[in-house]
Image: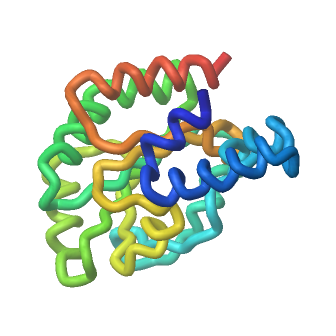
Amino acid sequence: MALILFISANKLSVMKNITLLTTLLFAGIISQAQVKEAFTDKKLPSVEVQTLDGKRVNIADYGKNGKITVISFWATWCGPCKLELNNISDIYDGWKKDYNVEVIAISIDDSRNTAKVKSFAQAQGWDFEVLLDPNQDLKRAFNFQMPPYTVLSNQEGVIVSTHLGYKNGDELLLEDEIKKLAK
């Protein structure tokens, strides 16, 4: 299951890794457990991003606070991103109360658009933290091409799923995954 979720998130580089891992598996060089390990139990990377006030924060620190963390990569030019975050915003209070979830919205807009990001986020009235990745260091660490891209990590900061793209209702599927982690 984790393998399938990971494939949808990073098609090109993961397909190369899968080909290599499959070859090694069939050659008897590695075991099935090692193949599974290659795609699960990855902690949030230690990469710094910026707050809207320009302070530096390490994304890995969010995995150390005992909360389920949803990281949503977005951009001001991305319609599906804004729709996803607005839909999450509508149900976020319930997630916080019922599942001890935090949502982090990370803009991948470049540094020229930082002011636009801040004003847009404030106008939306989002109750979650908005961070900036103007050099796209975190985006590169997650190895995806275009937003929206959503990462779900458990209470220990271990990434349990990723999702590329958005269509109405995806936030409800995400909530189903969150419920499993909250048990």
Residue at x-position 70% and y-position 49%: 23
Q: Is residue 169 above or below residue 63?
A: above
Residue at x-position 45% and y-position 25%: 95
Nearest the viewer among 110 and 55 is: 110
Q: Is residue 27 visible?
A: yes
Image coordinates of residue 144 in percent, x first then y, are 40, 59
Q: Is residue 175 above or below residue 42?
A: above
- Report which quarter residue 146 is drawn in: bottom left
Residue at x-position 20% and y-position 55%: 122
Color style of the picture: rainbow
Q: Is residue 65 visible?
A: no
Looking at the image, how many numbered discs can be counted on the residues?
0
Nearest the viewer among 1 and 149 is: 1
Residue at x-position 53% and y-position 53%: 14
Q: Return the residue found at the far front.
A: 27
Image coordinates of residue 55 in percent, x first then y, are 46, 77
- Report which quarter residue 183 is drawn in: top right
Q: Is residue 168 above or below residue 83?
A: above
Image coordinates of residue 104 in percent, x first then y, are 43, 50
Q: Return the residue found at the far bottom.
A: 112
Nearest the viewer among 88 and 79 is: 79
Residue 71 as seen in the image, left or right of residue 58: left
Which quadrant is the N terminus positioned in?
top right
Image coordinates of residue 169 in percent, x first then y, are 26, 22
Q: Is residue 88 above or below residue 116?
A: above
